[in-house]
Amino acid sequence: MKSDDKYRFNLQFGSDTEQNRTVGVFIEKLGNKKSKVLVPIIYDYLQQHPEMLINASKVKLEVVQSITQAEIEAMVKQSIEKLTQSGELQITNASTPAINSDDVDNVLDNFLGDMNSKFG
């Protein structure tokens, strides 16, 4: 909303994702300097996406679920355990799993299948 040659906005979003929490903490730390940081960021984005200015009334937002590094590591560990138990992967050294080069595609397919079933 514009008044007295200034724009004033109220911004609110949940803290339910890592992305939202990270941005929320960052914005809070900016204190009274939010506009000095956010205006150039948004302006740069609009320069890269001029269609946003043309179709401003038809803005479509898509939320993409982000996966944390811890979640990815847990999925990799789970896939390795599953492959080890099935005999498709043999660990010869506790710190270096040995994967037969012929089985790499199979290992990746299993891992991607597990990720797809969780985040489809």
Image (cartoon, rainbow, N blue to C red):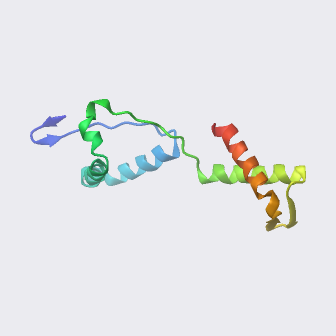
Residue drawn at x 83%, y 52% is 83
In this picture, residue 62 sits left or right of residue 101: left
Q: Position of residue 106 (x, y in %)?
A: 78, 52
Give the farthest residue toward the front.
102
Residue drawn at x 28%, y 53% is 44
Q: Quadrant of the N terminus?
A: top left
Q: Position of residue 72 (x, y in %)?
A: 65, 51
Residue drawn at x 46%, y 50% is 22
Residue drawn at x 64%, y 52% is 70
Please identify the quarter of the rendering in which residue 9 is found: top left
Q: Position of residue 34 (x, y in %)?
A: 28, 50
In this picture, residue 70 sits left or right of residue 89: left
Give the farthest residue toward the top.
57
Q: Quadrant of the C terminus?
A: top right
In this picture, residue 99 sits left or right of residue 111: right
Q: How many marks?
A: 0
Q: Position of residue 99 (x, y in %)?
A: 81, 63
